[in-house]
Image (spheres, rainbow, N blue to C red):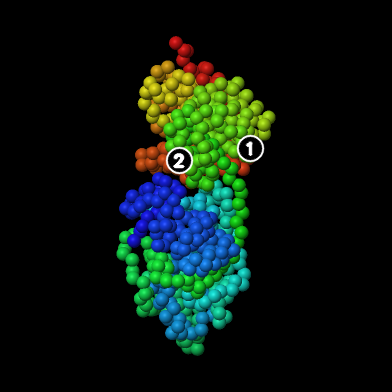
Amino acid sequence: MLVGAYDINVPRRNQFCNHFKTTAYESLESLTADADLIVNLTPPKEHYLVSAYVLSQGKPVYTEKPMTTSQDDARALVEMAVANNTNILGAPCGHLSEMAETVAHHLSENIIGKVYAVYAEMDDGMLSQKPYEKWKNGLGVLWPAKNEFESGSTIEHAGYLMCLLQRWFGTATVKCVTQHVCIPDKVIPLHKKTADFSCAVVEYPDNIIARITCSIVAKEDRQIKFFGETGVLTVGDVWRYDAPVKWQNMITIRRKTMLNPLKRTLKPVTSAYPKAPKTSNAQMDFCRGIRQLAQLTGPDHEKMAALLKINELVLEMNGESISRDQHPWIILGTGNMASNMGECLARNGYPIKGVFSVQAERAQSLVERFNAEECYTSLEEIPHATTKTIAYVASINVNHYDQVRNLLDKGYDVLCEKPLTMQLAQTKELYKIAAEKNLQLQENLWSLFVPSASKIKEAALNYQSQNNQAIELTFCATIPYAADSRQWHREAGGCLYDLGIYPLAWAVYFFGDVERYTIDNHKVEHGIVSELELTTTHKNGKTARIKSGFNTTSQYIKVGDDYFTPIYAPEFKSKVGNNLIRKVREKLIAPNYPAKDPYAYIVDQLNTGNADHAFPSHASMHVATLMQEIHEATAPAAT
């Protein structure tokens, strides 16, 4: 019976417990006190601390793979289990499957004679190019891409093979291992580089040699082949507990010995564990290992030694990871943008030290949601930065200057929502202060940092080198008039400051400084400029047509006959060349469809101190200069 569950993420804990109609515990201590057995499904780096506490209370624990990320810690857990008269076992439990029993039975019957070699594959395809951002479990929780990629394919998957080979052949000795990071950033920025391809040659008793490969690069392949003196056994997919086992024997035709091309399916052997009810598409029964643990009445030294050995082999095959620090953040503001940034930071492993808002309840809500340390209700409460800390400013435009200046004075690197300020003199002043203090100050033009930006820039430069036609940059959104709307407020700067900054910055990013521009059209409604069209001519002779406005929904970059849509898509493949396909796509997919961690790229650059390289401060000031000139030329006179 499921007694209950605990998670440090309160909304996720409540969602899980509501779905499974079980108790939501407030702490690991209270859960452990009530339960007879704990299943540890935390991220790998948390396995040791959670398992150690449970074992210290004399309760058995079943842990997700790997047992720990340190073999010394793994040994300590086994010693702790024995000392407290209990057990620690863990995933995977494929060795308890019907397929494992079938292979064991037929090998013992010498169906292929002496086994010489085993080829074991655990390739999961080009995982980084799959639509993983859409993968959700039954509760709607997204697949934790960053955690999975940073853990690495070997940590995540090699155990499936190791537990089976150990079940069939006994204890292994590693002969040689090689690892490689083939794809450093799996579309999203990673702060821990771990092998996505590994290969080990392992020797088992009786001179059996196994080649084990594990990757998220090679074509999907999870088969094991056994090469013996009289034939070959093949398991097509080790993730399937009921996977058929195929046999090919050696035959001799006209003095030529060969492998029989016909594969015969061997009679399956029933597992000692009952089949779980079919409630999902899962091909594995994860509960068999938990059931095995529950049936033990005292420390099972053999089973724990087997788990310890598998952990050792997996860690040796995985090799060392290369990590870099993730600096803490504070957030100023509690609106949608602040919430989105908070989710991005939390999802990508950045600690959030504090949240600022003059509305204490709203600030406290985000503090609890993102497990932040402090709540600030005045700028004076924000402490000085004693180590590298980054502040994200997502307040209303008129507050940007005062808040950013306060943060720079206190030693924070700053990412500020656009526009940085509403006055050019203030913008220049803030960049000057940042430079004098050797701090990073970046306007949140995050779309210039996504992977597709450099690809689109290359296409734009190539096109204008061969043609005299301007490229088009359009960023419009349907924002109905409302007297209290931020966008329609006179001091907010109209569509230029709210939307036009994006295509204008993209044009500067593509072609450099603007030499001259013409205002082709603008429309004034309710005291602000609601529609604006420009043509910019840059110092290198390139031209761009720019459009922004509040009355249509159209966001794209057009380079000749090629469309890149939407303008801020962080995907490599954002190019839609066919006009009809583009129009159909725009109807099917809203222009603001969720992107793959869009803020993650600019966050990563700020974390490493490289943000100024993508869109330097002088480019931001150039855009700010243009915007003030254009605003003064188009804005209606105050009445």
Amino acid carrying mark 2 in the image: Glu
Dot 1 crowding, Cα within 10 Å, few <14, some 14–19, many 20+? few
**Label 1 belongs to which residue?**
386
Residue in view at x 41 percent, y 27 percent: 550
- Which residue is farthest top? 639
Q: Is residue 278 left or right of residue 58?
A: left
Image coords of residue 557 (percent x, y):
48, 36
Image coords of residue 216 (percent x, y):
51, 59
Q: Secondary structure at mark 2?
A: helix
Camera-side residue: 499 or 392? 392
Image coords of residue 331 (percent x, y):
52, 35
Asked if residue 593 is positioned above or below residue 243 in the image, the reply reads above
Q: Is residue 427 left or right of residue 284?
A: right
Dot 2 crowding, Cα within 10 Å, few <14, some 14–19, many 20+? some
Amino acid carrying mark 1 in the image: Thr
Image coords of residue 438 (percent x, y):
67, 34
Asked if residue 148 is positioned above or below residue 371 in the image, the reply reads below
Q: Secondary structure at mark 1?
A: loop
Count of marks, rendered view: 2
Residue in view at x 45 percent, y 19 percent: 490
Q: Does the rendering let one see residue 462?
A: no
Asked if residue 74 is positioned above or below residue 18 in the image, the reply reads below
Q: Which mark is residue 368?
A: 2
**Labels 2 and 1: the sequence-earlier one:** 2
Residue in view at x 47 percent, y 55 percent: 42
The image quadrant where one finds the C terminus is top left
Q: Quadrant of residue 614?
A: top right
The image quadrant where one finds the N terminus is bottom left
Circles 2 and 1: CB atoms closer than 8 Å: no
> For the residues marked 2 and 1, what is the alpha-carbon distance in whole angstroms?
24 Å
Q: Quadrant of residue 455?
A: top right
